[in-house]
Image: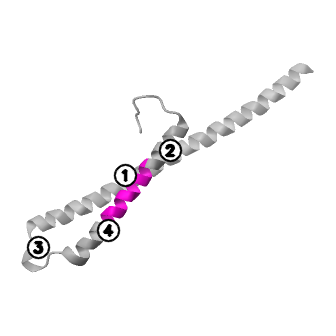
Amino acid sequence: LIAPPEKMKSTDRLVSAMDLADDIRAQKEIHQAKQQQWEADLTPVGKENTDEAKKFVSRMEAVASTLDALEKEADGEAAKYGNDIVFMAEFSNARNIFMGWIESAEEK
């Protein structure tokens, strides 16, 4: 998305970034559900709290933080390309107004 193999239009980049952010949010929901299941039913207690269980908990925390970072990055990219589209529309509108003014001035 950041460095595509082929040139992409701004609208395509925006749609791709928004789709990516939606996919990441879906993965976060799945992860949160699994985290709640872990905390409610599967949390090791006493002797069950082994090094392997601690590693699993730290991996789950790493996944959560990675998903948060990815969501933030995807939302940032979508906002950036969204602004590009707005700026391009403003530029095109101003150009059309200016060209209209030039044409009317040349007619005089």
Give the distance between the C-alpha atoms of the residues marked 3 and 4, in whole angstroms.
21 Å
User: Crowdedness of circle 2 by 10 Å Cα count: few (<14), some, many (20+)?
Assistant: some
User: Where does label 1 land, which residue?
Assistant: 70
Tell me the residue that label 3 is attached to: 49
Q: Which residue is mark 2?
A: 15
Q: Residue 48, percent across and down? A: 9, 75
- In magenta, the rendered stretch is 20-33
Residue type, label 3 = Asn
**Alpha carbon of mark 2 to alpha carbon of mark 3: how far?**
45 Å
- In the rendered structure, find residue 33 and report the number of the disc placed on it: 4
Q: Looking at the image, is mark 2 or mark 3 earlier in the sequence?
A: 2
* Total number of numbered discs in the rendering: 4
Sequence-wise first label, 2 or 1: 2
Tag nearer the camera, 2 or 1: 2
Q: Amino acid at mark 1?
A: Leu
Q: Which residue is outermost to the bottom?
A: 46
